[in-house]
Amino acid sequence: MSQLPLTPPRYYRIRVRGDWSRASFTRARGLRLESVDNGGSSPVTVFSGAFPDEADLQRTLDALFELAVEVVGVRPVQDGSALDRD
C-alpha cells in the first residue's frame, strides 16, 4: 500500500472582536492567543497557528461561530515565523 505524500500545515491568523484571551478551546487546539490594541475601539484577539488542512481550519471557525464569536478576518501566512507580525 503506497502512502500519500504529507503536505506541510498551513498557518493562519484569525482575528475576532472582543477579548478572548482566556478561551480554553483555542489552547486545546494549540493556537496562540494575542490581544491587539484596535486603536481605542473594541478589543481584538488574534488566534494564530498551524492547521493541518482546511477542514481543521473550518472546524475551528465553526467552533467560534457556535460560541457567537464575531470573526473579523482570516488570513493565511507564509510560515510560522510570520505569526509574530500583523
Image (cartoon, rainbow, N blue to C red):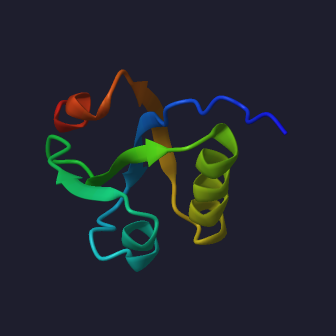
Tell me if residue 45 comes above or below residue 55 in the rendering: below
To which quarter of the image does residue 62 belong? bottom right
Give the percent coordinates (x, y) of residue 49.
37, 47
Name the one closer to the observer, 24 or 2: 2
Residue located 65% across and 29% down the image: 5
Residue at x 70%, y 46% (from the top left corner) = 55
- Estimate the x, y position of residue 18 in percent, counting from the top left: 34, 61
| Residue 86 is at least partly visible in this image | no
Looking at the picture, how far across and down is residue 41, in whole percent?
23, 48
Quadrant of res 6 = top right
What residue appears at the point 39 percent right and 78 percent down from the top-left corner?
24
Q: Is residue 26 left or right of residue 36?
A: right
In the picture, the quarter occupied by the N terminus is top right
Left or right: 5 in relation to 77: right
| Residue 69 screen position, x and y as percent | 52, 62
Is 84 situated left or right of 79 in this image? Answer: left
Residue 12 sits above or below residue 42 on the image: above
Q: Is residue 69 visible?
A: yes
Q: Nearer the viewer, residue 16 or 5?
A: 5
Number of dots carrying numbers: 0
Most distant residue in the front direction: 1
Left or right of 41 on screen, residue 28: right
Query: Quadrant location of the C terminus?
Result: top left
**Nearer-the-camera pick, 24 or 64:** 24
Q: Residue furthest top?
A: 78
